[in-house]
Image (spheres, rainbow, N blue to C red):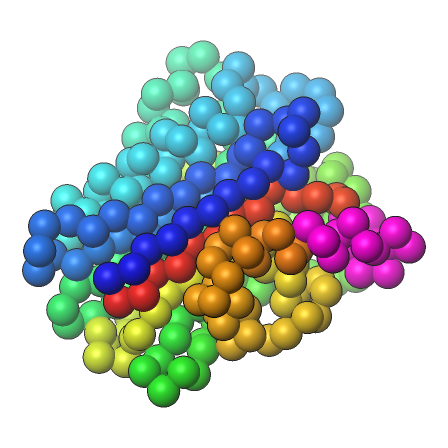
């Protein structure tokens, strides 16, 4: 098994709000991949005394632990339990009902000798490569399906579409959001490799259109996760006319994980 991971902050002046881990428990027990992309709040109060990295570290740690130790639970049940556990650690100090309480996108994968389970919530990506080289993206595309203008401002997103019916969902303080995740499983024999990307790393495909998902995995295999991130940074710096970035951040936190089974 080969596991490689790289992450880079969008700016040296801000902490990296992504979080990732890939673990391989005892022989024969398979493994777990966890990837979170913390949601940067706008300036002003979010009702919480804790930072986004504080939140992603606690939620990610719980997801990794429970995914490995509680194989009797589905990944959706694990996400629900982890959100509840994380919320309980700061419920007495923070306003968890605030629409901008710390939150994150989620990618989870868990495998053993029989199957590969997956869960995706919001706009991070999970790629599954078959033995013949075919790459299947597992995506939660609800953000892409929003009506034009829905994300014109942070206030609009919070009021109308963030964690709302008909909008999109992230892992914040409500355990029920786990039921909104994209979930499923694939026979282990049909999976050669997995790759997880926050949207800062998936820009190579999704914003800059340098290649499809198969090409993305090829870059990961040949240049490694850091190589993919380096290519994204080069494209971001070159887009001085903001042809591709438009209103997006020039540099976003970027994390990529490659697991070859």
| Residue 238 x/y as whole percent | 81, 54
Please tell me whether the stretch drawn in magenta is mainly helix, strand or loop: loop
Q: In which quarter of the image is the C terminus?
A: bottom left
Q: So how many labels did they put on this image?
A: 0
Q: Splitting the image into 4 quarters, where does residue 158 fall?
A: top right
Above-or-below relation of 141 to 32: below
Q: Relative to 42, is 70 on the left or the right?
A: left
Confirm whether the magenta stretch covers residue 6: no
Above-or-below relation of 229 to 194: above
* Residue at x-position 30% and y-position 42%: 63
Is any part of residue 40 visible from this angle?
A: yes
* Residue at x-position 66% and y-position 43%: 252
Above-or-below relation of 114 to 55: below
* Residue at x-position 65% and y-position 29%: 12
Is any part of residue 72 visible from this angle?
A: no
Residue, far right:
241
* Residue at x-position 45% and y-position 25%: 54
Q: Splitting the image into 4 quarters, where does residue 110 fall?
A: bottom left
Residue, far bottom:
132
Looking at the rendering, the stretch of residues picked out in magenta corresponds to 233-248
Q: Splitting the image into 4 quarters, where does residue 153 fall?
A: top right
Q: In which quarter of the image is the N terminus?
A: bottom left
Q: Relative to 249, is 67 on the left or the right?
A: left
Above-or-below relation of 259 to 193: above
| Residue 161 x/y as whole percent | 65, 49
| Residue 245 x/y as whole percent | 79, 54
Residue, far front:
222
Q: Relative to 124, is 209 on the left or the right?
A: right
Confirm whether the magenta stretch covers residue 244: yes
Looking at the picture, tell me which residue is in the foreground, 160 or 249.
Answer: 249
Q: Relative to 54, is 156 on the left or the right?
A: right
């Amino acid at each position: 098994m080969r596991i490689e991971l790289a992450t880079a902050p969008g700016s040296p002046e801000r902490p990296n709000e992504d979080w990732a881990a890939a673990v391989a428990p005892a022989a024969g027990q398979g493994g777990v991949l966890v990837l979170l992309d913390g949601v940067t709040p706008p300036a002003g109060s979010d009702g919480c005394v804790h930072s986004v990295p504080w939140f992603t570290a606690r939620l990610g740690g719980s997801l990794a632990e429970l995914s490995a130790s509680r194989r009797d639970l589905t990944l959706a049940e694990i996400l629900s339990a982890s959100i509840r556990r994380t919320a309980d650690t700061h419920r007495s100090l923070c306003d968890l009902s605030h629409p901008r309480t710390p939150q994150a996108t989620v990618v989870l994968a868990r495998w053993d000798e029989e199957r590969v389970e997956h869960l995706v919530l919001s706009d991070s990506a999970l790629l599954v490569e078959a033995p013949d080289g075919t790459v299947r993206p597992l995506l939660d595309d609800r953000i892409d399906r929003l009506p034009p203008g829905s994300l014109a401002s942070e206030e609009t997103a919070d009021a109308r579409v963030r964690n709302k019916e008909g909008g999109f969902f992230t892992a914040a303080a409500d355990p029920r959001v786990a039921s909104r995740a994209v979930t499923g499983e694939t026979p282990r024999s049909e999976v050669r490799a997995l790759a997880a990307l926050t949207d800062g790393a998936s820009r190579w495909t999704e914003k800059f259109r340098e290649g499809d998902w198969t090409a993305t995995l090829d870059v990961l295999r040949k240049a490694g996760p850091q190589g993919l991130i380096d290519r994204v940074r080069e494209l971001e710096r070159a887009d001085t006319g903001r042809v591709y970035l438009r209103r997006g951040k020039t540099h976003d936190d970027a994390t990529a994980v490659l697991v070859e089974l």
